[in-house]
């Protein structure tokens, strides 16, 4: 009988769908994380209260459990642990080099530039540099610019800079967020914002879905909603595929889920913002992609984390799927309206936190979300 014990790293609501899907597929789910009362602690067949960032302890857990595979889907924090354990287990995964550049926005941008992928002017800024040094290094840059911590996601520390006078304030803001005290500063690309959900196996790629993103706009660009499939001009999906695959190859991505974020300019050029070697968070990979494409995205990732090829059989009829974030009283009122007038369109919803009167600066500041299908 095949070993069906699956090790899952992480317990929060964005990780929970892969726990649920694994159980549907017949796996015995062993979920690891600190005991914090998260939903995954309850939905798992077996919950193990372990710090998933403690590599030595996690390897001892692997030796005890002897799992068929090791998976985490949305967390960059746990990505290092997952790949470390997969390598020791002898299961193919991305290289340490790919892992390093996929969690450092500056190294990622440099790798794509070296691979011939279109890039804006960019530079690395550290807390050791003076503002005069930065002014001197950006004389060829065209405003507006954007700065982001090299080591964070979820819109944390992002700031758009309209002119030279706003540069220092923006960099100070971003550097304060960065654990490394390093920020990437680059020219801002105008155009609608998209992301993609892709899968890699043995260095071959397939784009499963393109997501239209909605954000708060400048200066912080916190995401307010997502739509799949994105409305695209004829032929654009194929052009996106070609460009994405070139970027993935530049980063030497070989295995697992991939979440690229990019803009499309008026003249049809595609510019990357960043690429993560994981599913898109905010329910994009776990919910929207299976709903809009019909593909079992989580099943593919579970297969790959065991050393098996992904299965591209469609498991459901594709639908229009949208994620709506609650950021104001008006958003909450609209959710209540949908619940009352169109309840059949709601796929699922989160618990709702109280609406805050503070500015929304990052994804965690949002009050909740609901997903609709049509």
Image: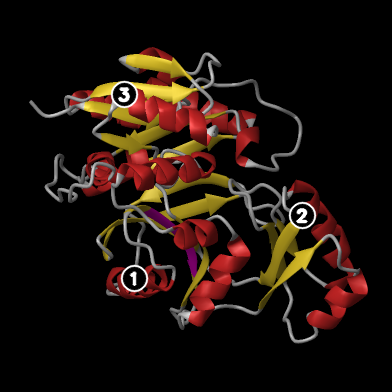
The residue that label 1 is drawn on is 245
Residue 282 position in % (x across, y down): 47, 40
Camera-near label (1 vs 3) is: 3
At 58% from the left and 67% from the top, the residue drawn is 107
Give the main secondary structure of the magenta stretch: strand
Distance between the Cα atoms at labels 2 and 1? 31 Å
In the image, is 146 to the left or to the right of 201?
right
Work out whether 294 lies above or below 171. Answer: above
Residue 38 position in % (x across, y down): 49, 18
First of labels 1, 3 by sequence position: 3
| Res. 58 image quadrant | top left
- How many numbered circles does the render carry? 3
Distance between the Cα atoms at labels 2 and 3? 38 Å
At 51% from the left and 81% from the top, the residue drawn is 114
Residue 182 position in % (x across, y down): 73, 59
Q: Residues within 10 Å of mark 2 (few under 14, many from 20)?
A: some
The residue that label 3 is drawn on is 65
Work out whether 35 lies above or below 209. Answer: above
Whether pointer 2 and pointer 3 mark residues with C-beta atoms closer than 8 Å, the reply is no
Camera-near label (2 vs 3) is: 3
Residue segment shown in magenta: 258-263
């Amino acid at each position: 009988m095949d070993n069906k014990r699956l090790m899952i790293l992480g317990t929060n609501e964005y990780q929970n769908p892969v726990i649920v899907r694994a159980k549907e597929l017949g796996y015995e789910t062993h979920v690891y994380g600190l005991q914090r009362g998260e939903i995954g602690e309850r939905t798992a067949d077996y919950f193990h209260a372990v710090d998933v960032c403690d590599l030595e302890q996690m390897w001892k857990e692997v030796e005890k459990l002897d799992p068929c595979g090791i998976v985490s889907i949305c967390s960059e924090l746990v990505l290092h642990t997952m790949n470390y354990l997969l390598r020791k287990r002898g299961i193919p995964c991305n290289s340490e080099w790919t892992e390093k550049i996929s969690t450092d926005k500056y190294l990622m941008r440099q790798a794509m530039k070296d691979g011939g992928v279109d890039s804006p002017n960019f530079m690395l800024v550290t807390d050791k540099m003076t503002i005069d040094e930065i002014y001197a290094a950006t004389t060829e840059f065209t405003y507006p610019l954007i700065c982001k911590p090299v080591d964070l996601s979820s819109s944390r520390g992002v700031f758009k800079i309209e002119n030279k006078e706003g540069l220092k304030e923006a960099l100070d803001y971003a550097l304060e967020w960065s654990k490394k005290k390093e920020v990437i500063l680059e020219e801002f690309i105008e155009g609608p914002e998209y992301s993609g959900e892709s899968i890699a196996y043995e260095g071959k790629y397939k784009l499963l879905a393109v997501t239209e993103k909605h954000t708060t706009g400048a200066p912080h660009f916190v995401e307010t909603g997502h739509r799949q499939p994105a409305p695209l001009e004829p032929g654009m999906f194929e052009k996106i595929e070609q460009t994405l695959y070139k970027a993935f190859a530049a980063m030497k991505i070989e295995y697992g889920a991939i979440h690229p974020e990019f803009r499309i300019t008026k003249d049809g050029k595609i510019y990357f913002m960043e690429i993560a070697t994981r599913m898109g968070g905010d329910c994009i990979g776990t919910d929207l992609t299976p709903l809009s494409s019909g593909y079992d995205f989580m099943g593919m990732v579970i297969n790959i984390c065991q050393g098996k090829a992904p299965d591209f059989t469609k498991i459901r009829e594709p639908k229009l799927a949208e994620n709506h974030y609650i950021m104001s009283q008006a958003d909450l009122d609209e959710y209540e309206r949908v619940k009352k007038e169109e309840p059949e369109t709601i796929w699922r919803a989160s618990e709702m936190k109280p609406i805050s009167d503070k500015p929304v600066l990052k994804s965690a500041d949002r009050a909740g979300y609901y997903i609709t299908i049509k």
